Amino acid sequence: MAQGAQRVRFKVKRYDPETGRVWWQEYDVEVYKGMTVLDALRKIRADSDPTLVLRFSCRMGVCGSCGMVINGAPRLACQTQVEHLGTDMVVVEPLPNFPVLRDLVVDMEDFFAKHRLIKPYLIRRDVEEQENPTLEYLMSPDEHQLIKRYTYCIQCGLCVAACPVSAIDPEYLGPQALAQAYRFITDVRDEGYAERIEVVDNEHGCWRCHFADSCSVVCPKGVDPGQAIQLLRKTIFKYRLRLFRKKASPVAPPLKAERRPGIPEPPPRTVQPEEAQEA
Amino acid sequence: MPRKKPKLLDNRGGLRHHLNPSYPRARWTAERWAFILHRLTGIFLAVYLLAHIFVTSRVAQGQGAWEAIMSSIESNPLGVVGEWILWGVIVFHGLNGIRLVLAEALGIGVGDPRKLKVPPEPESVYGKQRALLWIFVVLGFIAWIVGGIILFGEAGWL
Amino acid sequence: MKESTVQLIQYLTAALLVALLAYHVLQHTPVLEEGYRVSLEYENVVKHYANERTVLALLLYAALFHGLNGLRAILLEVLPSSAGKAATILLILIGIAAAYFGTLTIVEVA
Amino acid sequence: MDEIVHDVAIIGSGLAGLRAAVEIKRFYGDKIDVGIFSKLQLMRSHSVAAEGGTAAVLYPEEGDSFELHAWDTVKGSDFLADQDAVFRLVELAPKEIRLLEHWGIPWSRRPDGRIAQRPFGGHSFPRTVFAADKTGFFEMQTLYGKLQQYDGWERYDEWFVTSIIVEDGEYRGFTVIDLSTGEMYLVRSKALILATGGGGRIYSFSTYSLTVTGDGLGMIYRAGLPLEDMEFIQFHPTGLVPSGILISEAARGEGGHLINSKGERFMSRYAPERMELAPRDVVARAMMTEILEGRGVEHPSGLKHLYLDLRHLGEEKINERLPFIRDLAIKFAGVDPVEEPIPVRPVAHYTMGGVPTDIDGRVLDHEGKPIKGLFAAGEVAAVSVHGANRLGSNSTIECLVWGAITGRLAAEYVLGVKDLPPKPAEKAAAEEKEIFDKLLKHESGSDTVYTIRKELGDTMDKYVYIFRDEEGLKKALSKIRELKERMEKVYPGDKGRVYNMDLVRVLETRNMLDVAEVVATGALARTESRGAHYRLDHPKRDDANWLKHTIAVRGADGRPILTYKPVKIIAWKPVERKY
Ligand SMILES: Cc1cc2nc3c(=O)[nH]c(=O)nc-3n(C[C@H](O)[C@H](O)[C@H](O)COP(=O)(O)OP(=O)(O)OC[C@H]3O[C@@H](n4cnc5c(N)ncnc54)[C@H](O)[C@@H]3O)c2cc1C
Ligand code: HEM
Ligand code: SF4
Ligand code: F3S
Ligand code: FES
């Protein structure tokens, strides 16, 4: 693309819930180098059509708001540069497999509910320690690395939009929830594997995945739910065959360490606590 | 207090997305094509199995019954082509099935979760299972052709 | 039955089928027979039945379970929950019927 | 208008809001029913953008101490912080870190399995706990996940609060629009925890999410309550050019260098000891000086910038400690930090001021009396631990600490009162009329919210930036007033009910204009330089006259009236601030 501006046509699928009308609308946008699809859609809103609605917030790919289908693939609008798409017509649609609220905004209630089902928090037997911590639970960098990529999930829903099973089975837990279930099951600090396995080991749970791996290729954060789900099933088989043993990592022992060199002392107080008052 | 509900538009991809191996369009996944083929071949095989049980039950009714049904298949060119397709279906479903048992049930070849590139890439796509898929595709294709040569040769077509 | 158990059997039968099917197919190839057509002549077929009773029976049950359970998986996804349950029952009945017929053939021929 | 009733309502689901909700649930369980209102889906709040880390004293054995953390914070604040609050912060911080750890956060680890820490600007000990460079994101994820453990709370995703009603020194309720249906509701609760975050989007070049528009600040101000120290806006040294996306201070904490167009590490001229790790105000001013003196580089977008150089750290360290920074630089600026330096420029980053509260998070009126049933926590509140300049990684910990404190306190308060406060029917009806009969019925002229916002942002970027002077501030103020007038005649272009973003933008812009006016007024009045507030015409700190907090209340003519409030000094008297 040349230095100067270039016009790109945006074709957006719209839905007006008040009349029930669904239609395609086209807009021309002057794009500049580095312009993202989100920038372009916001420009359309500001310059020509304030009734076009979409969801966004962080504009830096961490909040997970701006998932939509761009040129046939689920992507984050804020992370997709118009230039990189390389087409002079950009087709934008709401994420499939989610009900549409209006234009590009989809309803994610069910998606969040499924995430909630898999208990996305550490489960420990030492509840007393867990709620009144003394020191941290041990976890080596290597153990951390085991769950790291799964913790990157921003709940954008792109994986569910891409999954062929979510496309036909509304009750399927979906790649996001299943990957998170595995994230907690493999966390060395967690002891809740039995509970979580009961949640995912059912007719609409992890067995409905057929390793199409579309979830993994569309995931904007490299979470790789496809991988997580396969490893999850392996773990479940092990657990059912009573080969799975896990002992949650303990609380760290008290630290014995030397004072680090070069750390200054805080200066002596110049106001004594008794005379402390408002200056 | 029950909340008011908006009027939502159902946008589930349905069978159209389910059966479309090229969705999402951005990056082609071989695994998705394999899945959809595996599913179609599986259905084919299951239906064939029931038919097969019925056909073979003729053996129990004596030579006449058996030869009658066999010749109706063998004399029909579609029957021979059908056998060749069946052979291809078995080969694909079987070989891909081996890959699936390894990957899905044993977690073999789906990549090491600890490996994290920056920006992160999906390891399962680059894992050994993908290589295995291609190997099987090639092997399966060869087996299918060899099967074809035998079948068509015996039918006197070659 | 837990879904994981069902699925485990699905994978076990898959693994088993690789061996059984390989054997079954080889019986009809020039490797173990004179040729495919020849292997399907009445006497040869009957001979096979007599020699391979157990293999054929195993193959029958494994393939039936594997294939019908595969269909069940698909139906569970396409149908709503309640219909999925009904489909399961229907497939079990089909399975039992087919297993009965198949067994009958094996017993009678062998 | 329908009513929604809860024991405790929380507005805002950032770190502060979620932490408060978790605290109430884990101590009071089903006894207290909570409603969480957020104009975004809960886990999308701006807090996810925080990158660098969270400060806490974890290893006193290695030489860190509460006293040292407090001193760093007080010195960083240029002595404007309330020191009692600072001590509260540092003492409660370690527990928050360990609680999050016990709830599942993947903190980065030392080889022996303990929590790792990194150096950060203005801290004398490497005490910033981090989770790679997405700390805020992981904290949000953990709190959101933890909340799922409990029942008895209701989520209101994408409900936009339009006004908070306070009458007779008591909180009465608030009005809110459910974006998914366009219905308006009056929410009544025995207590309200306000956690709506800062107001950084009044600047165009800003690290903030696009939705951080200072709504809480604006609504409190319009409810007749004061705002404190709003002139102190932090400018972060390293905003990615041209988008303003934050390049975390962690990049410098891990050893990154700032260089100018001549390739010099210019910080040696401004803070020879701490170099790049001097506090943000110092580094940001140094950078602007370099740029103004002509040692900057011009970006195609027209912005002048300097470079942040990470190349000497090597690919391995960058990937392990700063993966997100690399990701961002590649995706949003087309620069791979392993091979090229990153173009950066100081950027609006944090709102030090906010709603004045006492040390427990109770909202105060302009006389310092607590408002019954109203609490505030997080960036929206000014407990004043940050004074005139916040130290990096001290704000997420503030959100956690005061989230927990206000949660506990609000719950106890609610258990002590029997009835809901009286129904503020009149004000609620007036708000409904304003929106549905006025805003949604009129057509605007040539102005749109977007032109107003752009002009506001550009004005702030130009005149109320790092270097300020009387002339510029006066220009800014008159421009803001002009915009406010023009805003009277701007209506949403979208007249639909469901998910009317344009209506939200109009309401937000009103809040932004109010907040901007308070910022500029406070800055004009404060004739000294302290922390982030630097006046070219008054370049010295003036403790004799200005060691006090600014309090701004809305006057009858709509303009802010300023009064002042003393600083609480319990440990250290001001001394010269050198790094
Ligand atoms: C890019 C960036 C990086 C940062 N990095 C760090 C760091 O490394 N370390 C550190 O300590 N601090 C950092 N900070 C500062 C810190 O992230 C914020 O101060 C903190 O996250 C604020 O949290 P909060 O809970 O107060 O508010 P927010 O997270 O801003 O949440 C505000 C909430 O209020 C809701 N809300 C607002 N208005 C309305 C309304 N009208 N109706 C309904 N709901 C409403 C929003 O939906 C949202 O849920 C960073 C800030 C930025 C901008
Ligand atoms: C060569 C031996 C075979 C192997 C290794 C094999 C392997 C597999 C595997 C692993 C699956 C599970 C796929 C998943 O759930 O993702 C599967 C599914 C299936 N198989 Fe087989 N199979 C074999 C033979 C057969 C036979 C003989 C039949 C027919 C009777 C059959 C019918 C099916 C069906 C219908 C499915 C379901 C397809 C789906 O859910 O997508 N398979 N097979
Ligand atoms: S797994 Fe990836 S695609 Fe799916 S919700 Fe999480 S971040 Fe989005
Ligand atoms: S796309 Fe769907 S089928 Fe499985 S691997 Fe991913 S969840
Ligand atoms: S706007 Fe936050 S992910 Fe795109």
Image (cartoon, coloured by chain):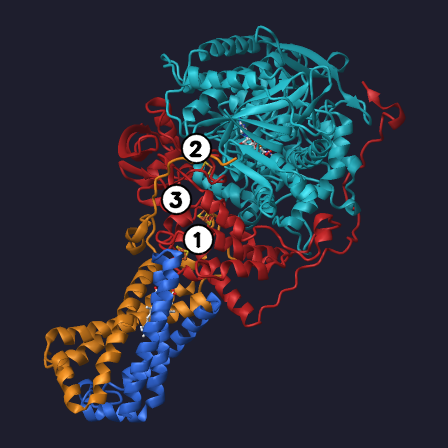
Which residue occupies the foreground of this view, D224 or A216?
A: D224
What is the display colour for chain A? red
Tell me the amino acid under the disc marked 2. Ser
Which residue occupies the foreground of this view, D92 or D498?
A: D498
Chain given the colour blue: C
Q: Are marks 2 and 1 on the same chain?
A: no
Mark 3 sits near ligand 3, with its Cβ under 8 Å away? no
Compare marks 3 and 1 and give the one earlier in the sequence.
3
For residue B5, what is the image quadrant? top left
Q: Residues within 10 Å of mark 2 (few under 14, many from 20)?
A: many
Residue behind mark 3? A98
Which residue occupies the foreground of this view, D247 or D292?
A: D247
Residue lying at 33% horizontally and 37% vertically, measured from the top left:
A83
Mark 1 sits near ligand 4, with its Cβ under 8 Å away? yes
What is the display colour for chain D? cyan
Which residue occupies the foreground of this view, A146 or A107?
A: A107
Q: Residues within 10 Å of mark 3 (few under 14, many from 20)?
A: many
Residue behind mark 1? A174
Residue D180: give its label.
2
**Residue D228 percent location from the top left of the image:** 66, 19
Q: Chain of mark 3?
A: A
Q: Chain of mark 1?
A: A
Residue D235 visible from this viewpoint: yes
Q: Quadrant of the C terminus of chain D?
A: top right
**Residue B67 percent location from the top left of the image:** 14, 87
